[in-house]
Image: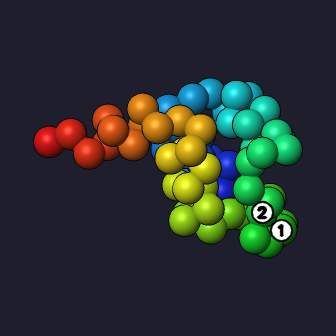
Amino acid sequence: MGAAEIQERLGISRQRAYILINRRDFPAPTATLKMGNVWLKSDVEAWIAEKRPHLIEADEEP
């Protein structure tokens, strides 16, 4: 996932997404490409489950 996908997944602004991905508790990027850092989806989802569990519950509703 890139920053844009993380932004979309969390439903936040681009600025807020960059603040979050630069936090010490956010997973380290898997790789750095010309377009920027990328993260494993599983790492981001694990972070969401731990830090933003209300987003997991909302996704599981029918």
What's the residue type where badge 2 is placed? Pro
Location of residue 13 by image quarter: top right
Q: Secondary structure at mark 2?
A: loop
| Residue at 68%, 36% in the rendered image | 17
Inter-mark Cα distance, 2 to 1: 7 Å
Q: Quadrant of residue 42?
A: bottom right
Q: Quadrant of the C terminus?
A: top left
Q: Quadrant of residue 15?
A: top right
Marker count (numbered)? 2
Contact, mark 2 vs mark 1 (Cβ under 8 Å): yes
Residue identifier under label 1: 32
User: Could you say which is closer to the camera, residue 24 or residue 12?
Assistant: 24
**Can you give x and y, in whole percent of width and height, for residue 51 in the image?**
59, 38
Q: Amino acid at mark 1?
A: Thr
Q: Position of residue 43 (x, y in %)?
A: 62, 62
Q: How far across and how far down the image is residue 53, in percent?
A: 46, 38
Residue 23 coordinates in the image, percent (x, y)? 82, 40
Q: Is residue 46 left or right of residue 23?
A: left
What residue is disc 2 on?
Answer: 29
Q: How is the image coloured?
A: rainbow
Q: Is residue 26 left or right of residue 22?
A: left
Packing grade of label 2 (10 A; few <14, some 14-19, many >=20) is some
Q: Secondary structure at mark 1?
A: strand
Label 1 crowding class (10 Å Cα cut-off): few <14, some 14-19, many 20+?
Answer: few
In the rendered structure, the answer to whether residue 34 lies left or right of residue 59 reads right
Q: Nearer the viewer, mark 2 or mark 1?
A: 2
